[in-house]
Image (spheres, grey):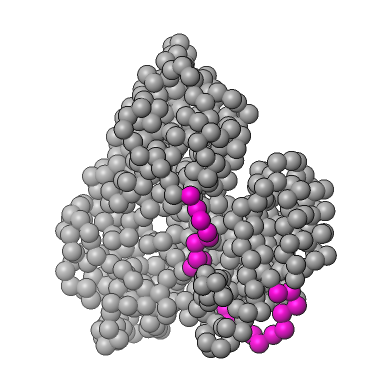
Amino acid sequence: MSLQQIDAKMLSKMFLAGAKNLESKKEWINELNVFPVPDGDTGTNMTMTIMSAAKEVASLGENPDMEGLCKAVSGGSLRGARGNSGVILSQLLRGFTKRIKNEEILTVSVLVEAFEKAVETAYKAVMKPKEGTILTVARGGAERAKALAEEGAEDMGEFLADVVEHARYVLSQTPEMLPVLKQAGVVDSGGQGLVEVMAGALDAFMGRETDFSIPVESGKTPSRNVGAAEQDIEIKFGYCTEFIILLNKAFNIKAEIDFKAYLESIGDSIVCVADEDVVKVHVHTNDPGLAIQKALKYGALSNMKIDNMRLEHQEKLFKMNSQKETKTADGSVSENSAPAMPRKDFGFIAVSVGEGINEIFRSLGVDYVIEGGQTMNPSTADILDAVDKVNARTVFILPNNKNIILAANQAAELTAEKDLFVIPTKTIPQGITAVINFVPELSADENEANMISEIANVSTGEVTYAVRDTVIDDKEIKKGDYMGIGDGGILAVGNDILQVARTTVSGMMKEESELISIYYGKDVTEETAEAFRDQVSQLYPDCDIELQYGGQPIYYYIMSVE
């Protein structure tokens, strides 16, 4: 291979090296979070997204073909996407691979078109693109690539080095585009992650010492989903069967309808989600082999999982704890399976963190709680898995975190059999308000409009601590200070936690406010929380004050004003 082109083998090495380089820098990237909170997670989200794809790439071996490589990169990153930065990264990879999947070798001109397609795809995935972010860095790299090609660039090494260097320059300018970055003294963390991927790939192409070995996935990671309590029921179809078809032939609408009809003839609780080159399948059946044999007609299978639901159900009843994961006879961890019952009209999925808050959502009728949030954003695959488990025709998803909304929307686009409505809740209190205002007698569209309208009336504040010195919103913050963070930014800073919490509430209050809700975290004693509630009651005697145990980590208090 000359220095003017890249084949599939080299591209595979470059991708794996880029993934490893990002992984090695993830904690540093986490620390670039604008707010100096202890749960910055951009590096973690991007790493988990790209490593999901890297494991699929590694399983292809040392000599993949371009089409197979592109399927692994696009499909793996799409299913593993976590957080806004991870979803955007997956869309960049998706657009890039769309352009190159039918090429045997990549030249400068092909790469220019692939970079442009990547940027176009990523920008379309974001409703309101903001400059000074990973999108800006990606676009800057693509524009530099086009300019170099127009100048007659041919040497691939020089071309790639120039593109990476320009992307790094654009990254350095992000603080000039977003004042909040400049005030915090950091560059955009998502853009930094993208540059690290590009730099690692360049090192591999240039033959510089790099470790691009990725462990091949040997089994499915145990889910963090926690389902609603199971009932003592008769299970009609005993085996929960899941797998992914890596398509090697056309899977058009007719093929999809025929395949679903076959699955319905041998089982129930069917989910069949087609996404270009892969099909995600879930079915409850008494003969998993029949489903597998039929699927093999369309392509190879991966991520196979078969659970004996009858055995698991008996074990769970014996342990009297339907919320915990159970172990099968071979010792592997298995997930809760939805009971084979008629589908109800509406179901709810909520992303939550903290045993108290989890229980609040369940008590309000939420069918499935995905444990996650700031510290660990659930992936698109996690959300799809939860959708599989909710036995309802229409499912409302409450992300409860602005960094999870994109992944939830991506899951909705990949689901065909159920109607999914993503209510754009950005905080836990908004999620609680949304489900409280659900009216079963209304239609899905009416409920969606009603819930979106109601969450707009919720102001949220959170009290945590700073992990570094910085300046935000003209407030000087020292490492170890308590911070009150509202919907629009920092509301309070100090070394007295109750004073910071009171000031935070004050910054959230409006003349028409009637209700103040306080959820105290696992590091706050009940006595301290009650003292805080009493102080708030004295300050706002005309408001109803609710105090509940949230059990959330990192945030001492999550508060809302309505």
Instruction: Point out residue 516 in the picture as x, y percentages from the top left corner.
Output: 39, 78
Answer with the quarter of the image where residue 316 lies.
bottom right
Give 429 or 288, whichever is nearer the viewer.
288
Please say if 294 is above or below 531: above
User: Quick one: quadrant of the C terminus?
Assistant: bottom left
* Residue 188 forms part of the magenta stretch: no
Note whether 71 is above or below 335 in the view shown. above
Residue sitting farthest toward the top: 152
The residue sitting at 44% across, 59% down in the picture is 377
Q: Residue furthest front?
A: 330
At x 56%, y 88%, the residue is: 318
For image coordinates 58% across by 29% down, the residue present is: 100
Is residue 247 visible to the viewer in this orientation of the structure? yes
Residue at (75% x, 41% y) in the render: 250
SS majority, magenta? loop
Q: Is residue 175 above or below residue 259?
A: above
Which residues make up the magenta segment? 216-238
Q: Which of 426 and 206 is in front in this view?
A: 206
Q: Does the magenta stretch include residue 217?
A: yes
